[in-house]
Amino acid sequence: MKKEHVLDSTLVSQYIRGEEQALETLITRHKQKIYSFIYSKVYDKDVAEDIFQDAFIKVIRTLRRGKYNEEGKFLPWVMRISHNLVIDYFRKSNRMPKFDNTGEFSIFSVLSDTSLNAEKQIIKDQVQTDVRRLVDELPEDQKEVLLLRIYNDMSFKEISERTGVSINTALGRMRYALINLRKVIDKNQIVLTTD
């Protein structure tokens, strides 16, 4: 079977069994997408190249230690490693915006900060994307209340009128939405803060 038709999961297994060529195929297959993603965050070819190499060093170490268990989702796994390395890069260079995650709506406070420089804007965009992706995973009723509250800036009274539920029900749905968001954030170890 030609290498380009082999599944990522098969190539991962082959590499773990000692076939070095399998990793080369994986890197070649995904280099453009991963490198482009990293470059779109750091806007520096040398830095992007370094982060790309660091990502694959992590991949190799994890595979060799037998710690890989992503159920065949190789690309999203490498993208997550790359994303975390980009965050680390901004942290180390002290250019990471400080996001506080203690208040009730603090995850979203970043979305309204208008005084951001280029690096902060990149991180803000990534956080915004991550948050929207997480919000999409919520049950429909919780998602509706959260979107109306955070993105439409509606009061719970307005939400109650719009959705036809009591204010207490709207408050309850918001509370559960935030609890569920935190669970997903913890479960996936998503970095939304610099603490």
Image: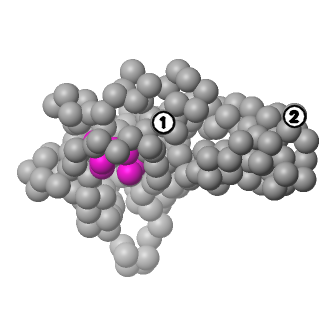
Coordinates of residue 37 in the picture (x, y in percent): 30, 58
- Name the residue rendered at 81%, 55% in the picture: 162
Q: Which quadrant would the N terminus be assigned to in this image?
A: bottom left
Q: Earlier in the sequence, mark 1 or mark 2?
A: 1
What's under tag 1, amino acid-wise? Answer: Ser
Q: Amino acid at mark 2?
A: Asn
Q: Residue furthest left?
A: 46
Horizontal side, residue 49 vs residue 152: left or right: left
Query: Compared with residue 186, is residue 159 higher up or lower down, i.e. above or below?
Result: below
Q: How many C-alpha atoms fall within 10 Å of the one at disc 1: few (<14), some, or many (≥20)?
A: some
Relative placement, left or right, of 135 versus 60 is: right
Question: Is residue 22 inside the magenta stretch?
Answer: no
What is the CA distance from the residue labelled 1 to the residue labelled 2? 24 Å
- Residue 175 is left or right of residue 52, and the answer is right
Extent of the magenta region: 120-126
Q: Quadrant of residue 177?
A: top right
Q: Residue at position x 47%, y 67% from top?
A: 7
> Residue 16: percent from the left, percent from the top?
39, 46
Residue at disc 1, secondary structure: helix
Q: Label 2 neighbourhood size at 10 Å, few (<14), some (14-19), many (20+)?
A: few
Q: Residue tagged by mark 2?
A: 168
Residue identifier under label 1: 109
